[in-house]
Image (cartoon, grey):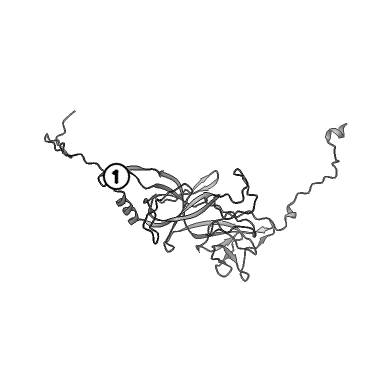
Amino acid sequence: MAKNPFEKDDKVDVIPRDSEYIQESFDLKRMDNFVEGLGVEYLHYKSIPSPIGQRDRGDYRRSDGVDTITSNGMIYHCAGKFRATLTDNSRDRKRGGAGTLDPSEGLLVMPRFYTLKENSTEKERIYLSPGDRIYVADPNVDVLVSNPQKMDYQQDQDNIPMFPIVKMEVPLIDSQNIEYINNIDYCVTKEGNIRWLPAGKNPGIDPATGKGRIYSIRYLYRSYYYVTDLLKEVRITNITIDNQRVPERASYFVKVQREYMYRNQNRGDAVNQLKPKDPGRTVQEPIEPINPSKYQVPVDMSSIADGEDDEGKQS
């Protein structure tokens, strides 16, 4: 192999050969400060499986009452606040066998501890699990995202979209290409639902189906995230404390997903239901026709005698 013409014979060691060996350590406190300095404050809601209404651990149906306090079959409790940095926040929409898929994933760079609570001097360590829910704590931060959706007109009740509406983006339009004006034909309630006003127009009932006409909306809603993967969970490293090498746990590294087609909350009946503390996303149920008898198929059973079949008639 030819000698490099720029290489010199005199070499200098980057680390002196006779120098004392230095043990390197991560400064976890400074790493926490770095993440918290760049990050924003989040609310962490821990999830536990909901036992409400179940009589057996293997029950698929909740026979004992109506459970509308859970989402995704989970109950959520606020564990605290922490400052973290969200990176690689993306949105992608693809067609699949189950319909439109939108991963909307991001990576969360986190500290080790929650923000100190009032009248507290001891920091509480953060523990995450897939399915936990994370909100941006500051209500004034712009975390609004857009969502288009089709809905069925339901008279004499609020029409509930997939997400609580913060602001309508475009005029509401129905299947007859009629547009409706906000605060004249309908209004958005404080819960984020659509309420049709008695003095305004509405899509009405389709006489061909006996159900409310379909209409389309596009609105902004306040986004939040679910923990989907713990990319780095139990990370132990040696650090130096008082000239002693001791093991210490580092922070999580987490993949999160925005709640697109992920959260599902039961609506239940008008009575005997547990109300959630925070407004939840719901999936609209199919609308029953007003006159279902119109669509029943008549079957004449008078020609069939009891206890007879085709073989009996031949014999």
Report the residue at 85% width, 40% height from top: 306
Residue 58's place in the image compared with 180, above or below, is above
Which quadrant of the rendered structure holds the C terminus? top right
Choose between 299 and 247: the one closer to the eye: 247
- Image coordinates of residue 256 in percent, x first then y, are 44, 49
As drawn, which residue projects farthest toward the left? 10
Classify residue 261 as left or right of residue 201: left
The residue that mark 1 highlights is: 239
As drawn, which residue projects farthest toward the top? 1
Classify residue 118 as left or right of residue 310: left
SS at mark 1 in the image: strand
- Image coordinates of residue 184 in percent, x first then y, are 57, 70
| Total numbered labels placed on residues in the image | 1
Choose between 26 and 211: the one closer to the eye: 26
Choose between 295 and 194: the one closer to the eye: 194
Choose between 300 and 28: the one closer to the eye: 28
Residue 68's place in the image compared with 21, above or below, is below
Q: Residues within 10 Å of mark 1 (few under 14, many from 20)?
A: some
- Image coordinates of residue 74 in percent, x first then y, are 54, 50
Q: Note whether residue 208 is visible.
A: no
Dot 1 amino acid type: Ile
Which quadrant of the rendered structure holds the N terminus? top left
- Image coordinates of residue 270 in percent, x first then y, are 64, 60
